[in-house]
Amino acid sequence: MDLHQLYVFTKVVEHKSFSKAADDIFLSQSTVSSHIQSLEKSLNVHLFDRVGRESVLTPYGERLYQWALKILQLKDEALLDIGQGLTESKGAIRMAVSSVPGQFIVPKMVKQFREVYSGVTFHINQSSSKTVAEHVLSGIVDIGILGEKYEDEKLCYIPLLKEKLVLITSNLVNMNSPINIQEIKKYPFIMRNSDSGTNTILQKFLQESQISKEQLNIIAYTDGQSLIQFVVQNIGISIISEVAANEYRSYKMLNAYPIEDFDTERYFYLVYNKNKTLPLISKLFIQASNELVQK
C-alpha cells in the first residue's frame, strides 16, 4: 500500500466509478483498476462491490476511506510544514460560483490569494446557486461560492459575507425611500432566473406580501450583466443583491432603494464536499476564505 494507491482509491470512492475517477486524475481506467487490485491484494480484502455501473464500497472500503483521508491530509500538512509543499501550492483550484459572487466577491479573493500563492491557477465556472451546489456535491469542482444553502450531509458551508436585497431603477426613475413592495406592481419588472439564490429569497418575500407573479408586469427573466443593462436602459426595475447594486451605484449607473419591511438578510457561502479529497492549494484557499473577503 502506498500513498498514490490511496489517492486513486479516494477518487474512485468519490466518483463511484473507475472510469470517472480515471478521467479526473488523468489515468487510464486499466491503471486505476490495477492500483485498486494491488491495494486489495496488499490488504487481503475486497474494497468494492460492483453493483450495475456503480462501484459500491464494502465495509472494509468504508473504513479504509476514512483512514485514507486522514493519511493524505497528514501528508499534505507534513510537506507544507517542512517547506516542500511549495510545488503543490502551484496547482489549480476548480471553483463554481453563482453570479453575484462571481462578479463582485471572487475576483477580490483571487487577487488577495495570488499575492501569497502566485503560482496558482483558477478554473472558475459561473452558474446558478443550485448548479454550484450540485457541482460541489458531484465532485466536479473543489469549491463553490453561492448565495443560498442547499442542505446535504456531505456539504460544509462557511459564511463569508452578509447582505440584503434592494430595489434598483435607472437614473431616470426617482422613488421615495424606502420602497413599499406593492409599488413594484406599477412598473415593468426584470426577474432573476429561477435557480438563483436571489430569486428564491425574493419569491418568498413576494408570497409573504401576497403578491403573485400574475400581478407583476414581468418583461424578462435574466441574470448578471443582462439584468443590469435592462435596468440601466430604463426598460424595467428589478430587485438584486445589495453588493451588486452598490458597485453599479458607485459609478452612478443606477439608483438603489431599501425595501420597506424587507429585513431578510442572507449570506454568501463558501461550500465544499467533506467527502472529497481536496488538493492542498484548495484547502489553503478554504482556510483563508474569510480573511480574503475582509481585505
Image: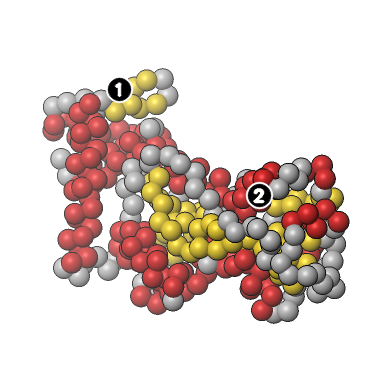
**Quadrant in which residue 102 is drawn:** bottom right
Residue 149, how many percent across, how many down? 49, 48
The residue under the point 20% across, 47% down is 70
| Residue reaching furthest to the front | 261
Q: Which mark is residue 205?
A: 2
On screen, 43 above or below 174? above
Going by the numbered disc 2, the residue's amino acid type is: Phe
Q: Is residue 97 left or right of residue 71?
A: right
- Quarter of the image with the N terminus is top left
Q: Which badge, 1 or 2, is on the more N-terminal residue?
A: 1
Q: Is residue 226 visible?
A: no
Residue 267, how many percent across, how many down? 50, 58
Q: Which structural element holds mark 1?
A: strand
- For the residue pair 148 and 33, the one nearer the viewer reads as 148
Q: Which structural element holds mark 2?
A: helix
Mark 1 vs mark 2, CA separation in Å: 48 Å
Going by the numbered disc 1, the residue's amino acid type is: Asp
**Dots 1, 2 in contact, CB < 8 A:** no
Q: Which mark is residue 49?
A: 1
